[in-house]
Amino acid sequence: MRRVRYESTGGPLFLEEVPVPVPGAGELLVRCEAVGVTLPVVRKVTEAAEPIPLGGEIAGNVVAVGEGVTRFRAGDRVTGLCFGHGYADFALLHEAMTSAVPDDATCVEAVALVRSGLVAFGALEAARPVPGEAVLVTAAASGIGQLAVQLARARGAGRVVGAVSAPAKADFVRSLGADECVQYGDADWGEPVDCVLDAVGGDLLTPALAALAPHGRLVAYSSGGGTIRAYDLLVGAKSVIGFQMALIARGRPELYERWRQELWGLFTDGTLKPTVHGEFTLEDAARAHEVIETRTNLGKVVLRP
C-alpha cells in the first residue's frame, strides 16, 4: 500500500510502499476513503524534533477486525481518529475511537464533521455559554471554526463574531451564521463578547482576551501556545479554560460518544453543514499542508487516497 511519510523536521513529504498493517486486539483495519488534514499535524511536521506518523481523522470501509472487536465488521463504513499512520491507503483505528458513518453521509462529510465537530462542540461546552450571550470564534473559516460558528448559533448565541486572518474569508464566515467578522489585525474587535473560542493562540491571545467583557471566558484549544498576564485576567474577572479533546476521549468515553451522536443528529437535521475547501490525492499531501500552513482554506482540507 501507499503511505505518506517524511524523514526530517519540515519534510519534504513523500510516498512509500509498505505492507498493509494487521489489526491487533481492539483494532479495525480500514481502507481509507477520506483523510482529514489538521493544523496540529502540519505543525508537528514543521516543528517536532523527530518524525511522527501522519495521523488524524480518517473515514472508509472496514476490511478486517482484530480480536475483541464487537461493534464493527468487514464492510461497515466508519470514521475515527487514527493515532498511527493515517495518510495511507489503509489505516488502523481503535474501536473506542470509531463510529459508524450514517447512510446519508459520505466519507468526506464524515471526516469534515466528526473530529472537527467534536473539538468545536467540546470547546463550546467548556465555555458554558448562556443563551443570548455573544460568542467570538477565532480561525472561524477553518475546519473547526466553521462548525464552532454554526454550533454557537444553534445553541442560542445572541451574537456570533468570526475572527479571520484575511478579508477574503469574511463572506464565507457570515454565510455560516456569523453576525460580524473581524480581522486579527484590526485595532478594535467591536463590542465585547462573553465567550471566545480560540484556535490560534500565540500573539493572538492578547486581542482575544481584550475582546472579552467582564466575567468573560476564553477557551484555548490551540496547539500554538502563548502567554497571558495574570493582571489581564484580574482587572476584568476573566477566565481562561484549556480544552483538549484527547482527554475527553480517553478519560470520559461515554461523554465522547454522546457528543458524537449529537453531532450526527445535528448533521442529519441540517443544522450543521461542514464545508470542504478541497480534496487532494496522497501524492499532493504537501500541497494540502501548504493550504493549511498559509491559512487560505475555507473549511476542511481532505486527502482522498
Image (spheres, grey):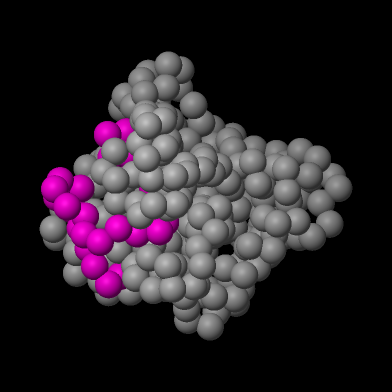
Q: Is residue 153 magenta?
A: no
Left or right: where does residue 66 sit relative to residue 34?
right
Q: Residue at x 70, y 42 (%)?
A: 250
Q: Taking 236 as reference, is 42 above or below it?
A: above
Instruction: Report the magenta residues as a range.
Output: 178-205
Q: Residue at x 34, y 44 (%)?
A: 209
Quadrant of residue 173 in the image? bottom left
Left or right: where does residue 186 sit relative to residue 269?
left
Residue 205 percent coordinates (x, y): 32, 39
Please tell me which residue lies in front, 64 or 265: 265
Q: Is residue 185 magenta?
A: yes
Residue 66 percent coordinates (x, y): 79, 45
Q: Residue at x 63, y 62 (%)?
A: 259
Q: Residue at x 29, y 45 (%)?
A: 210
Residue 72 percent coordinates (x, y): 76, 60
* Residue furthest out toward the bottom: 269
Please tell me which residue lies in front, 142 or 182: 182
Q: Taking 203 as reference, is 180 above or below it?
A: below
Please tell me which residue lies in front, 104 or 203: 203
